[in-house]
Image (cartoon, rainbow, N blue to C red):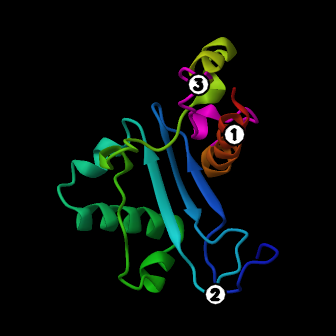
Amino acid sequence: MEEGRPHDCFYPNVVTYEVSDGEKAFYDVAYKKEASSHVMALLVQGAHAGGYFDLGSKEAMVQAALDELDAMFEGAASKHYTGEWRLENWGQTPHIEGTWTTAYRERSRDLKTIRKPLDNRVFFAGEIFDKHRQMGVPGAVLSGFDAAHDALTAE
């Protein structure tokens, strides 16, 4: 049992997969948070996500994920499954249309270009605009602070 994990939690914090295009991981949503319940999530990004959508329904996608977990954890996923689930298709969510950027793979001069404000009146924030290279939500938040500061101090 990992330190700080409830005794009845049958899975580790993260299970990652090697996929040829994109990413795939099961992870504990409550990791490093004070929580009394267990929530396991599956994040699939890139071409590999198509295999789930090809199953035809959200219920079939959930069942496929549950089957994968059962195979890994000797049926423990089904045993503990409450029947509650939520599916987010970030690729189809307006104004989001995806999971996260891959700014760490971009050239720094390209990132400097896209971070420039328009006419010192429009300032951008979001994960890819983070100067501190935090990525994810923390990077988006930090970039928001930077954009607000820049807007307030712009001439």
Q: Is residue 23 left or right of residue 4?
A: left
Q: Quadrant of residue 48?
A: top left
Q: Quadrant of residue 140?
A: top right
Residue 17, image x and y in percent?
54, 46
**Image quadrant occupied by the C terminus:** top right
Q: Which residue is found at the position 57% from the left and 79% from the top?
A: 38
Residue wearing tag 1:
152
Mark 1 or 2: the one toward you: 1
Residue type at tag 1: Leu
**10 over 130 or under it: above or below:** below
Residue 112, image x and y in percent?
66, 18
Q: CA distance from mark 2 to mark 3?
A: 44 Å
Q: Secondary structure at mark 3?
A: loop
Which segment is the magenta one? Answer: 116-135
Badge 1 density bin: few <14, some 14–19, many ≥20, Cα 10 Å: few
Mark seen at residue 36: 2
Residue wearing tag 3:
117
Residue type at tag 3: Pro
